[in-house]
Structures are given as structure tokens and as C-alpha cells.
Image (cartoon, rainbow, N blue to C red):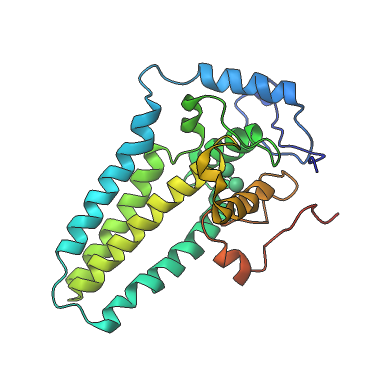
């Protein structure tokens, strides 16, 4: 079923240097196409989609390898770090998505600006696919997002290490980075064309549907806020099926 509404933003000319405001009204396909053309035209000439897709993950994988190589005499209880950090990261993803990506948080307004009036305006439940690889810029985590993740993960890792829990620090860093890499690849896979081989997996298909429902503008601020595995959506009872409740 096609969604009856889509994301729309106030035209900048109407509000001066205004904050784009999401409305629960439809952007017709032709206006989404016009927005796509405009956003692609704004893409810097130096932007290389394959570098954006591969470089952060490659750096992340090297950091994971370094962290794991520093582990010595691992015990069973230390291994519990992995599921604990995974659940915390999942809760963190839910919270940041709700608090900073769909509300303009004063500490990081740029996160909202990239997500709600651009990513959500362009991709709606039944039209999720990128048309051009340069659109990866509108799907993948931007450089400042990666910087924010790095500058929070590093001091936490250092603090745990400094407290004497070296293995826990390494497992924390490795799990947090692996989570971020999985976020990137899963989110990108949801926005690939429908006939892309990656979408043939039933698991990816189900996760993609969960995220596509989040892309209904009537639901985006409250429902299906996990982009990876919807664990915290289940805990917080924010799983929406389709069609949405009236
Ligand atoms: Zn998305
Ligand atoms: Zn969102």
C-alpha cells in the first residue's frame, strides 16, 4: 500500500534562514525528484561515493583488529562485554535517532538537518532506493557523525583501560566500532534498488521493511527508530506495522 503522506519541509524562502520543519503531509513525486536534483547539484565535486562507502569501514575494521590484538588472557566474564555493549549501542541508536535526528538538538543541529529534511524528504516507505551512487552522501553517516562517534568512543575506551580493565576496554571498542560499521552497511542495503542481490536475503528484507515503515512521515518521529536490529524498539514498544494507526 502506498503511503498517503510523505515528508515535506518548509521552503527556505518562506522562513528565511529557517529551521526546516517536518510536516505530516505529502511531498508529491515530482517535488521529490526536484529535491533529488537539487541535493545532487549540491554534492561537492570532490565527493567520491565508493570512498565514502568503503573508507570508514576499512578504518573501522583496522581499529577492530588492533583492539582485538591487544587482548590478553581473556576470561569468560570479560566476553560478556560484547552483548552488553551491543545492547547499549542499540539503545543509543534508538535514543540519538529520536532525540537528535528527528528533533533539532542544539548541540548537534546538523544531524537533524541532514536526516529529517533531506534523507526523509527524499526516501519514503514505498520509494526507498537511491537512483545515483552520489546519493550515498544522503544515506551514509557523514564525516562529522563519524567524528562524533570517534570522540565519544575513544575516551570511554581510555577510561575503562585506565581503570585496569584492558580486555574490557578492547572488547568495548571493537564492539562499538563493529556496531557502527553494521549500521552503515545495513542502512545502505535498505536504500539500494529493490532488485539488488543484497535484498534477496529474508533477514535483510525484514529489516528493510522495518526501516521503510519508519520512512512514513506520519511515523518517523516515534516509530521504528532502530535502523539495525529493532531490539530497543521492542523494549520501548515503538514497533509499528503497516498501515500505520490513525
Ligand atoms: Zn533511511
Ligand atoms: Zn529517521
Quadrant that contains the C terminus: bottom right
Q: Relative to residue 232, is residue 33 drawn left or right?
A: right
Where is residue 178, by image quadrant? Answer: bottom left
> Residue 146 in the image: x percent, y percent?
36, 44
x 54%, y 48%: residue: 105
Give how far across and how far down residue 79 sits, in percent: 29, 76
Q: Residue at x 54, y 37 (%)?
A: 196
Q: How many marks?
A: 0
Q: Check the image and name the residue furthest to the right.
A: 246
In-image side of 217 versus 186 (left or right): right
Vertical position of residue 4 compared to residue 96: above or below: above
Q: Position of residue 16 (x, y in %)?
A: 64, 23
Q: Quadrant of ligand 1?
A: top right
Q: Where residue 103 sits: x, y (%)?
A: 60, 47
Residue 220 in view in this figure: no
Whether residue 223 appears in this view of the structure is yes
In the foreground, 84 or 157: 84
Residue 81 in the image: above or below residue 96: below
Q: Residue at x 27, y 67 (%)?
A: 171
The picture quadrant where one finds residue 70 is bottom left
Q: Quadrant of the N terminus?
A: top right
Q: Quadrant of residue 223?
A: bottom right
Question: As drawn, is 11 to the left or to the right of 176?
Answer: right
Q: In the image, what residue occupies the spot 59% across and 33% down? A: 118
Residue 131 falls left or right of residue 108: right
Amino acid at each position: 500500500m502506498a503511503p498517503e503522506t510523505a515528508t515535506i519541509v518548509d521552503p527556505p524562502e518562506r522562513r528565511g534562514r529557517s529551521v526546516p520543519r517536518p510536516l505530516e503531509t505529502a511531498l508529491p513525486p515530482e517535488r521529490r525528484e526536484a529535491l533529488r536534483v537539487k541535493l545532487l547539484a549540491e554534492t561537492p565535486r570532490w565527493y567520491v561515493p565508493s570512498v565514502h562507502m568503503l573508507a570508514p569501514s576499512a578504518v573501522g575494521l583496522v581499529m577492530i583488529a588492533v583492539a582485538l590484538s591487544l587482548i590478553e588472557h581473556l576470561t569468560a566474564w570479560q566476553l560478556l562485554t560484547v552483548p552488553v555493549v551491543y545492547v547499549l549501542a542499540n539503545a543509543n541508536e534508538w535514543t540519538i535517532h529520536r532525540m537528535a535526528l528527528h528533533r533539532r538538538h542544539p548541540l548537534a543541529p546538523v544531524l537533524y538537518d541532514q536526516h529529517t529534511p533531506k534523507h526523509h524528504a527524499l526516501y519514503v516507505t514505498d520509494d526507498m532506493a537511491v537512483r545515483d551512487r552520489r546519493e550515498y552522501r544522503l544515506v551514509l553517516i557523514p564525516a562529522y557523525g563519524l567524528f562524533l562517534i570517534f570522540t565519544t568512543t575513544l575516551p570511554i575506551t581510555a577510561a575503562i583501560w585506565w581503570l585496569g580493565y584492558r580486555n574490557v576496554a578492547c572488547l568495548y571498542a571493537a564492539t562499538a566500532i563493529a556496531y557502527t560499521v553494521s549500521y552503515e552497511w545495513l542502512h545502505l542495503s535498505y536504500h539500494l534498488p529493490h532488485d539488488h542481490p543484497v535484498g534477496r536475503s529474508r533477514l535483510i528484507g525484514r529489516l528493510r521493511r522495518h526501516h521503510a515503515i519508519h520512512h512514513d512521515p506520519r511515523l518517523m518521529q516515534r516509530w521504528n527508530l532502530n535502523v539495525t536490529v529493532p531490539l530497543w524498539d521492542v523494549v520501548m514498544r515503538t514497533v509499528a506495522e503497516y498501515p500505520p494507526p490513525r
